[in-house]
Image (cartoon, rainbow, N blue to C red):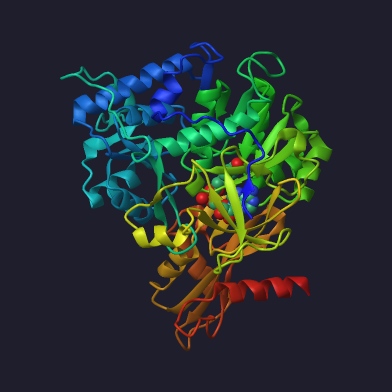
Amino acid sequence: MVYESPYEPLTIPEIDLWSFLFERKSKPFADSKEIFTDSETGRTYTFGDLRSTSLEFGKGLQSLWNWQRGDVMAFYTPNSIDTPPAMLGLLWAGGIGSPANPLYTEPELTFQLKDSGAKAIVTQLPFIETARRAAKTVGIPEDRIILIGDAHDPSGHFRHFSTIRNTSFSGRPTAVKVDVRNDLAFLVYSSGTTGLPKGVCLTHHNIVSNVLQMSSMDSMYFHPYGGIDGKGDKGLGITPFFHIYGLTCCIMVFIYTGWELISMPRFDLERACQLIEQYKISFAYVPPPVILAFSKHPIVEKYDLSSMRMFHSGAAPLTPELATALWDRLKIAVKQGYGLSETAPVATMQLPDEWGKFMGSTGKLLPNMQARLVEPDEGRDVEVGQPGELWLKGPNIFPGYLNLPENTKATMSADGYFKTGDIFVVDKYGNFTCVDRLKELIKYKGFQVPPAELEGILLGHKDITDACVIGIEDKEQATEVPRAYIVLKPGLPTDAAKAKEIVDWLASLTAPHKKLRGGVHFVSEVPKSASGKLLRRVLRDQVRQAEKK
Ligand code: 4UV
């Protein structure tokens, strides 16, 4: 059975993302409307500033480096209000943005730079050493490392964003005409349903579509001149811009709607509370552990959070208990959405006034989307009301993984659906609820931890002969945590000290969210199929059975 979105289809223009955001004939706010404000310095970009700054940066890229259509620029930085104009200037010049977690280690960053073919890196001073080493490995010249933010390089060695903007133009910089259905705006990284991180190709059309689809829901509730003080609804910018959730929902949607984002470089609960009180913030897009912090931590009591009307939770499951706990404590609605990097990202979403009615659900299909629930591996629709793998169709679905036609083929059905690898049920009102994950992915606080990546690194340890990594539920923290099952070479100790040594060793090689917080268990063998494929699900089922006892 094909499930259709219950909402009126939207007309999605055939337009590139820069023009979509900055060349609208009419928009419901003035050019002087503040869009991004830095939580620590109070520095602000209005809509007009964003437009002019991005244009200057795009022209600078063309003049300085002859930036070409399709050239990739990596963004290796925590949230900064300079990221949006830099990204949009890049798009104006025909480029493609590839955001990376700023806590990536050198090998992790090197992988993404190499795979994406990045020609320059945007970063900030504290991250420069890793950026520099990774750039050297892949052959990006040092003068193509661009600093954003308020700190300039005291040695004057690295170019600052502002100097590129002020480059005197040689030649005639011109907006590059892109093919909106085929040219990429962003290349984000996800392990998809299996294996190592892959470049998820997102076209201009994908992003324009999702901005329209997503904002058609929440702009019913939040307004450029709304909010408790009538000075405009403001969102708290905690979600990382380097993840597709922040990239679309916090950067692009805010420019389109005229809401103001108070952008934080990192999540700190007390600072978040201060900012909500100070700016009278109305809402935030967050992962579940942020809801947990607001619903449990005593510090919250010290602040007046009465301006907050809504948290939107996504990127990992939100339990009804957690949503209820927050409501009981602060009377803030917690609604849920669901999506993936491959769907640019939002696919289903609750409306704020629906949250209490369909607790635990991730809401209805966004406009212009269709879905099927399918018997895994068989391609047959499940009986109505039964759980099945969610397959999705819509204008926001990615065209494929970069240079990986086999993976792309495996993830698309013959009838043009994208196979999400997540198990859902749908009720008679069209509410979708995620009940399990078919694919191997682990999510730590909304961040991806691909088990195959950790297993590959573990196998490089001199004492390890085999390894299998699975996600373990950590209810206290409202997240999954990765745990490794490890086979050691014969005769080695299998005690707590050895386990800690392996946890610490892996932590030194990966970003912090990939740490084996679920610990290391030593085993004599890990489950495998006759053909030698790891059977992670067997271990997962064993853990679940043990938890039930
Ligand atoms: O590729 P990715 O890292 O993408 C995301 C996207 C987050 C979004 C998207 C739309 C929203 O409205 C929103 O609130 C957040 O995280 O990881 C995709 C996988 O994350 C899991 C699921 O396994 C996806 O395949 N996931 C995302 N949202 C949920 C979820 C959810 N609400 N409940 C359970 N799992």
> In the depicted view, which residue is nearer to us: 298 or 295?
295
**Direction from residue 326 to residue 201 in the image, left or right:** left
> In the depicted view, which residue is nearer to us: 457 or 12?
12
> In the depicted view, which residue is nearer to us: 502 or 86?
86
State which quarter of the image contains the N terminus. bottom right
Compared to residue 21, the image places residue 499 above or below, namely below
Q: Position of residue 531 (x, y in %)?
A: 44, 83
**Residue beneath the point at 74% across and 58% down:** 385
Furthest toward the bottom, the residue is 491
Can residue 505 be seen from the camera position used here?
no
Compared to residue 36, the image places residue 360 above or below, namely below
Furthest toward the right, the residue is 328
**Residue beneath the point at 59% across and 37% down:** 367
> In the depicted view, which residue is nearer to us: 504 or 255?
255
Q: Position of residue 22 (x, y in %)?
A: 43, 20
Q: How many discs mark residues in the rendered view?
A: 0
Compared to residue 515, the image places residue 155 above or below, namely above
Q: Position of residue 492 (x, y in %)?
A: 48, 84
Residue 422 sits in which quadrant?
Answer: bottom right
Q: Position of residue 481 (x, y in %)?
A: 60, 60
Can residue 392 be seen from the camera position used here?
yes
State which quarter of the image contains the C terminus. bottom right
Compared to residue 219, the image places residue 532 above or below, namely below
